[in-house]
Image: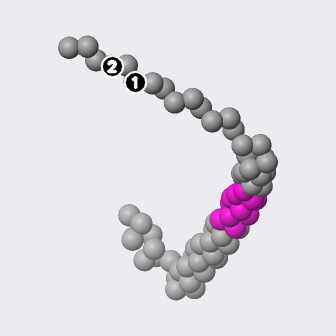
């Protein structure tokens, strides 16, 4: 039925519908790109925070190396 209704519309009305649809798609595209950019910024910020924490932990480990663990002795099998 949509095709019957569209056939009844004038070319000017159809053009207006196409332009409105195109404008809506462009607006959605801009919104999507903004969301992607915001997510990228958040990821970069979190990565930087994690890198800072990792470097601080590594520096602490270099300054205070952990105690070496004593090696476990093997038990001899009795046959």
Q: Which residues are magenta?
A: 36-51
Residue 9 is covered by the magenta coloring? no
Percent x, y for residue 30? 67, 72
Can residue 46 be seen from the camera position used here?
Answer: no
Q: Name above or below for residue 56 compared with residue 69.
A: below
Q: Quick one: 20 or 9, which is closer to the camera? A: 20
Q: Main secondary structure of the magenta part?
A: helix
Q: Name above or below for residue 37 compared with residue 76.
A: below
Residue depicted at 48% across the width and 26% down the height: 72
Residue depicted at 20% across the width and 14% down the height: 79
Residue depicted at 79% across the width and 48% down the height: 63
Element at label 1: loop
Q: Which residue does the numbered mark 1 point to in the structure image?
A: 74
Q: Quick one: 35 or 77, which is closer to the camera? A: 77
Position of residue 74 in the picture relative to residue 62 (left or right): left
Q: Quadrant of residue 4?
A: bottom left
Give residue 76's mark: 2
């Amino acid at each position: 039925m949509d095709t019957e209704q569209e056939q009844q519309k004038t070319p000017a009305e159809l053009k207006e519908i196409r332009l409105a649809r195109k404008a809506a798609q462009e607006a959605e595209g801009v919104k999507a790109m903004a969301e992607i950019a915001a997510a990228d910024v958040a990821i970069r910020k979190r990565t930087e925070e994690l890198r800072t924490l990792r470097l601080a932990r590594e520096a602490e480990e270099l300054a205070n190396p952990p105690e070496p663990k004593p090696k476990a002795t093997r038990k001899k099998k009795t046959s």
